[in-house]
Image (tube, rainbow, N blue to C red):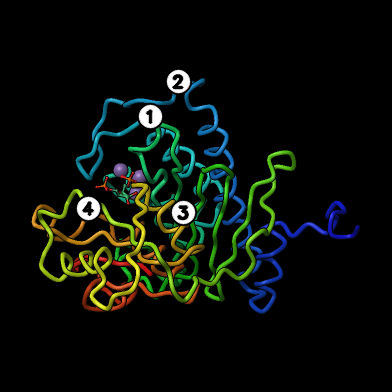
Amino acid sequence: HSADAQRTDLMTITRFVLNQQSNHPESRGDFSILLSHIVLGCKFLCSAVNKAGLAKLIGLAGETNVQGEEQKKLDVLSNDVFIKALVSSGRTCILVSEEDEEATFVEASKRGKYCVVFDPLDGSSNIDCGVSIGTIFGIYLIKEDHEPTIEDVLQPGKNMLAAGYCMYGSSCTLVLSTGSGVNGFTLDPSLGEFILTHPDIKIPKKGKIYSVNEGNAKNWDDPTTKYVENCKYPRDGSSPKSLRYIGSMVADVHRTLLYGGIFLYPADKKSPNGKLRVLYEVFPMSFLMEQAGGQAFTGNQRVIYQKQGEKQKISLD
Ligand code: AHG
Ligand code: MN
Ligand code: MN
Ligand code: MN
């Protein structure tokens, strides 16, 4: 039976991106090289996560990051791995990571035209109990006619050239958009390659799930409270929605992309700007959500049109 036969024509992520970029011969090689270094970081993390307990990687590292959070060992390790992989690609000029206080400016001899913003390990609170975690990244292209400055990365999300995430879950899944749709690749551990498994992901038009940390409800504003109330007690008599909340943005957004529904992390009285970080969490995920036919709002506007420093309450669906 042909459907059961072993697949022989493997669409790896490298092959896919090279095909996709064939219209842009000028950036073709550079982008694939950059991507292959991101992929290397993801494979390393996947392997580290799989043996986190065995390798004594669970637990705290003893430091606090720029967000004032305690860093986990895996936060620190994953940051080191991605920084080194990205610098050694020779294709990056500025790197901004959740775990580093300052942006990394790549030395001139290793410099390229891409800026990468990333959350090396998303969902830190889920490491020690083996729940899905991930890596989120966004890529900007800069003009090479000047010395790179921090302004080069402080751009709205709509200027991103590409964005993606890798989820270390029951399987390792990399979801990527280079601005023409969203595609998902699953790591085949025996090949060590990401193979196209989720071509052209489109978020379902209607979803039955809402996803939010309801433990913050006491501090929500009125519109948020009313919205969530309506998910549970719909005023139009329709069925209530189901609640799913993992607490790793990568996993909550991945489920939302595949099953539909809404994910939100609203601003509240405790964090008036919202908890999620605009540059390396909210922009990449919003870029993907829109590329998959969904929407991402701050409450006032499309997230990717937001300027840095503006209110960042968000919802993705
Ligand atoms: P990180 O682990 O990279 O610091 O990110 C955690 C973020 C995000 O993954 C998640 O959606 C959110 O924090 C969960 O926050 P709560 O635990 O407050 O629900
Ligand atoms: Mn963190
Ligand atoms: Mn995160
Ligand atoms: Mn993180």
How far apart are labels 4 and 3 at the CA level?
A: 47 Å
Q: Which amino acid does label 3 sit on?
A: Ala
How far apart are labels 3 and 1 at the CA level?
A: 30 Å
| Labelled pair 1, 2 in contact (Cβ < 8 Å) | yes
- Which of the marked residues, 4 or 1, is nearer the chain's N terminus? 1
Q: Which amino acid does label 4 sit on?
A: Glu
Q: Which residue is drawn at 30% across and 34% down?
A: 71
Give the label on residue 108, or none. 3
Q: Name the residue under label 4.
A: 214
Q: Mark 1 points at which residue?
A: 73
Task: Give the structural element (helix, strand or loop) at label 3.
Answer: helix
* Horizontal side, residue 68 vs residue 241: left or right: left
Density class for disc 3 (Cα within 10 Å; few <14, some 14-19, many ≥20) is: few
Give the label on residue 56, or none. 2
Density class for disc 2 (Cα within 10 Å; few <14, some 14-19, many ≥20) is: few
How far apart are labels 1 and 2 at the CA level?
A: 9 Å
Q: Residue furthest right?
A: 1
Density class for disc 4 (Cα within 10 Å; few <14, some 14-19, many ≥20) is: some
- Which of the marked residues, 4 or 2, is nearer the chain's N terminus? 2
Q: Give coordinates of residue 184: x percent, y percent.
A: 59, 60
Q: Which of marks 4 and 1 is in front?
A: 4
Residue 261 location, quadrant: bottom left
Q: Give coordinates of residue 227: x percent, y percent.
A: 21, 69
- Which of the marked residues, 3 or 1, is nearer the chain's N terminus? 1
Of 281 and 206, which appears nearest the observer?
A: 206
The quarter in which the N terminus is drawn is bottom right
Residue 302 location, quadrant: bottom left
